[in-house]
Amino acid sequence: CNPAIHQLRELPNCSPSAIPGYEHFGFGYLHSKKEYKVVRFFYMGPPGTLPVDVVLAQLRCEVFTLNSGGILNSRWKEIAEQPPYHPVFPGVLVNECMYWLARDKIVYYCQPRVMSFDFENEKFISICCPSAIDNFRSLNLMDLKGTVCLPDYDNFLKSSILDLWILKDKVSCSWAKE
């Protein structure tokens, strides 16, 4: 499976989402195991749940693994741990971990969060944003030379100075402004 040379592999059907359209995906590669992984977020809820009822639905996550020879698992594997936040933007892959900007709740205004998913151990980590970041306006996670970076475009529009918030330690939520 190599999309760069038009080798494609069709994945099996995943779990149905209770709320169509509220899905997020991530794609990563583990060099140590020579495996590709697809991670998918979806919502479980009562049958017939409407998008406005997303608060009633439970956010779930599942992973599909492929090795360099093809499919390793024949089905999606649900992650037992519930994701800590709701991803709201496409993720960025940095050092075999996927990072997403996320919210505590999907439909209401709240403090921006960062959530990571480690493809090696298939675990989530909750990461607080720097205290200076208080809204999602103009936020975008980036890979800056193998480090998670959060440019503060909102501040740039006010002062013409682009502050870069660099994640120094995801466990202790340590960010440095550069």
Image: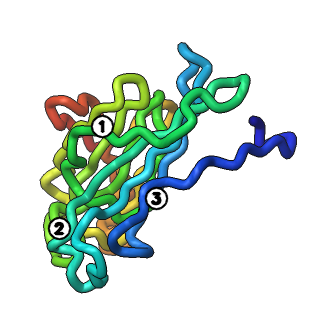
Packing grade of label 2 (10 A; few <14, some 14-19, many >=20) is some
Amino acid type at image mark 3: Pro
Name the mark on residue 90. 3
Q: According to the image, label 1 marks what residue? A: 167
The image quarter in which residue 117 lies: top left
Q: Is residue 90 above or below residue 108?
A: above
Depth check: give the residue in front, 14 or 98: 14
Quadrant of res 2: top right
- At x 58% / y 19%, what residue is drawn? 31
Image x and y of residue 87, in percent: 33, 59
Earlier-in-chain disc, 2 versus 1: 2
What's the distance in space between the residues labelled 3 and 1, CA to CA? 18 Å
User: Tag 3: Cα neighbours inside 10 Å, few (<14), some, or many (≥20)?
Assistant: some
In this view, the residue farthest toward the front is 47
Q: What is the C-alpha distance between the residues marked 3 and 2? A: 17 Å
Residue 58: x %, y % from top left: 21, 61
Q: Nearer the viewer, mark 3 or mark 1?
A: 3
Identify residue type, mark 2: Lys
Q: Which residue is most to the top? A: 32
| Residue ranking furthest to the right | 5
Looking at this view, is 41 or 163 the one in front? 41
Q: Residue, x 17% and y 57% (percent of image)?
A: 132
